Structures are given as structure tokens and as C-alpha cells.
Amino acid sequence: MTIDPKTKLANPGPATAFTDRAAKKEVLKDIIRDLHRGGDVDALKQRFAGLVRDVSGAEIGAMEQELMAEGLPEEEVRKLCDVHVKVFAESLDAQPAPQAVPGHPLRTLADENRALETLVAETRAVLDHVRSEPGHRDWAADRARLASLAGSLALIERHYLKKENQLFPRLEAKGVSGPSKVMWAVHDDIRAHLKEFRRVVEMGDAALVLNTGSWVLQEISDMVGKEEKVLFPMCLEMFADADWVKVKKGEEEIGYAWIAPAPAWPSAAGPAAPAADTGTDLHLDTGVLTAEQVDLMLTHLPVDISFVDENDTVRYYSATAERIFPRSPGVIGRKVQNCHPPKSVDVVERILAAFRSGERDEAAFWIESQGKFIHIRYFAMRDKQGSYRGALEVTQDVTAIRGLKGERRLLDWDRKADGEV
């Protein structure tokens, strides 16, 4: 029997358990459409309660994906995703948290969230003290503590990188990209607001510190909820063991936030991958090298390299010892547009279009980050016939180069060994 949502709304009865998952999803989408048209949140919560018994995080993710595919702007989904979760909050709270054994990537992310919640609570306690203390008599001590806590909060970058480089690509491979784009945009908001929080703490303006700190801590807490109620259940439902093995490998390359390296995960153990044929000769334009020699050359260059082919697919990045911008194996085979935050995609598209058309052969940017001056260049790669074959990204820390003066014509190892520059 088909249930007409409008009929149920006019004559609400007991909550209906939909056995047809597609029908249930259409009801959820209809509620969200009304929400985006400006519908009352409380009324829509009542409508939800009268129509369906429960909803999972995976279903919310699938619903958002379909709405975006139908033309709902990504920015609109991002702006109202907090409201989506609020409408379905009671149902989501009733869902058991995803469970995973120690060492499983999902358990690692959850353990990081527990550590993050402790850090957020400590930061809030200091802000509460600043807010309640007459005349901010202990401001100097509170400010020093907040500076330390803000530095610890900055490790959230590793947590978000694991999501962006490990979970999102695998969801995309299974046809689900909408929720990832929305969440990545929120990551960037949190990154910017954390940076601003650290700046105002350094400035020493207590009022700005209270406003900025309270705002970003709420954003961080909300993101923890979205991860554990929407993203993690979706991944657990859609990923096979082989996917999680790949996520585990990338996790180890990116590193951990606030917790010790995760223990070995039994499912990650298995037959070793066949060794690459490092002895094969590669006949190049001006020489012959083995695959091993090429790999050694690329990973010992004083620059980070990434290569995107003519179809905008990421084919390679140089796994140097200390990459400026972290990468993990999850980006290989991914469309380059999905490897950038949503706000940067237009720039990426413009560069690639100019390269493909032959209008441009190079694009360059430079930024200052964590005390480093970073030079980023993109080069169009063309074959001997002039056909576009892809783009090369070259990233270099040029801080020391910019500081060079005069000349050095002699080997100077001894003085460097004594600590002199």
C-alpha cells in the first residue's frame, strides 16, 4: 500500500514503519525539500515523527546525495545540514553508535573524537572563567592557557585529513559524493575559525576571544555529532573489508590527533602485496633508468610533485619524507576536483580548462603557512604532438631560498656541522 505523505500529515496517526526503503527515503526528501523552502522546524519534526519510526545516518547521507543530484545547490545543503540533523535528532540519538575493534580506522576516528571532546571541554572551562571573572584579573594566565589549548585544537587537521583523503574518496567510488562535499566545506569553515581564534588570543582581546572561541567550539562539537551519527554509519554500511584495509594504510601515513598510534588491526593483516618490478628498464628520451631509480629520484627531489592525467584523474604523488601538504593513497584514481575543498574547485576547473585549451601552460601561487613561504606551481604537460596529457603540481618550501644573500662558491659542510648557517 502506498502512503500519501500529505494525507498522513492532515490526519496523523501512529508512526509508520516503512518496509520499502525507497518510499521511506522519498518521505525524508519531501520533508527536507519543505525545510529548504523555509518550513517550520518544529512542525517538520512532528511530521517526521508521524511518518516514520526511525532514520539512520546512512539514510540521511543518501537522501542528501539524491537531492543534490536533483539540483538542490550544494551550498544550500551545507547551510542547512545542521537543521537536517536537528529535525532527525531524536531518531539519530536512538541509533547505537557504530562499534569497531581497537585498531580499526573507525575506532581510531572515534577515539580521536573522545580526546577532542575532552579538549573542547577544557577550552570551554577556561572561556567560562574569563566570562565570569570580574575585571579579568587572571586574564594573563587564562590567555596563556587558551593559546596552548588552541595549539592542541589545531591537530584537528590530521583528523579531517583522514576523512578527506581516506573516507571521502571511497564514498565517491560508491557513487556518494554530496555529503562529503558538504562536510569538507564545514571543515574549511572550522579551519578558518580556529585560525582566527588563535589570532585573537594572540591579540589579547578578551571579548573577541570569548565570541570566536565559543563559536568554533560549537562548530567542532556539531561536527563530531555529524561524523558519528551520519558519516561513520554510512561508511560502515557501504565499505567492504578491503576498503577499510586501504583506509588503515592511509591513516598511518597521515598520522594521529591527540592519541597514540592505533594498535594493529587483525583484518589489515593478510598476504603481502607483490613487490614492484624495480629492475625493469625504462627507456627515456635521454637515458635508461629502472623503476626503482625513477621512484628514488622523485622522492628525493626538494619539491612535492602530484600528477593529474588528461582526464583529471590523480595518477601519482611523490611520497617524500615530509610533504608540505599531506597526501595518502586514497587520492590515487580520484578526480582532482574532489581532492580540493568546494570553495577551490572553480579555480581548479579554470586552470585545467586553460591548460586543455592551450591558453595557458603554467599557473603559480604562493602562500605563508606556519612560518613557511610555500611556492605552488602547476604546469600543463603536452606530448611531442602538442596534445594535452595532464597537469603537474610542484610545491616547494622556499623560505630558506628567499633568505639567501651574497654567494657561496665553496663547500661549507664543516661550518654547518658546527651549527653555523
Image (spheres, rainbow, N blue to C red):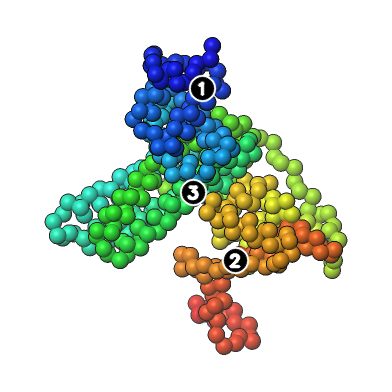
At mark 2, the secondary structure is strand
Q: Counting residues from the N terminus, which is met first, the one under dot 1 or under dot 3?
A: 1
Label 3, on which residue?
185
- 135 relative position to 107: left or right: left
- 249 relative position to 190: left or right: right
Residue 376 is marked as: 2
Q: Position of residue 313 (x, y in %)?
A: 69, 50
Front-most of residues 297 and 272: 297
Q: Position of residue 113 (x, y in %)?
A: 41, 41
At mark 1, the secondary structure is helix
Q: Amino acid at mark 2?
A: Ile
* Separation of marks 1 and 2 at Cα, in angstroms: 48 Å
* Separation of marks 1 and 3 at Cα, in angstroms: 28 Å
Q: Counting residues from the N terminus, which is met first, the one under dot 3 or under dot 2?
A: 3
Label 1, on which residue?
24
| Front position among marks 3 and 2 | 3
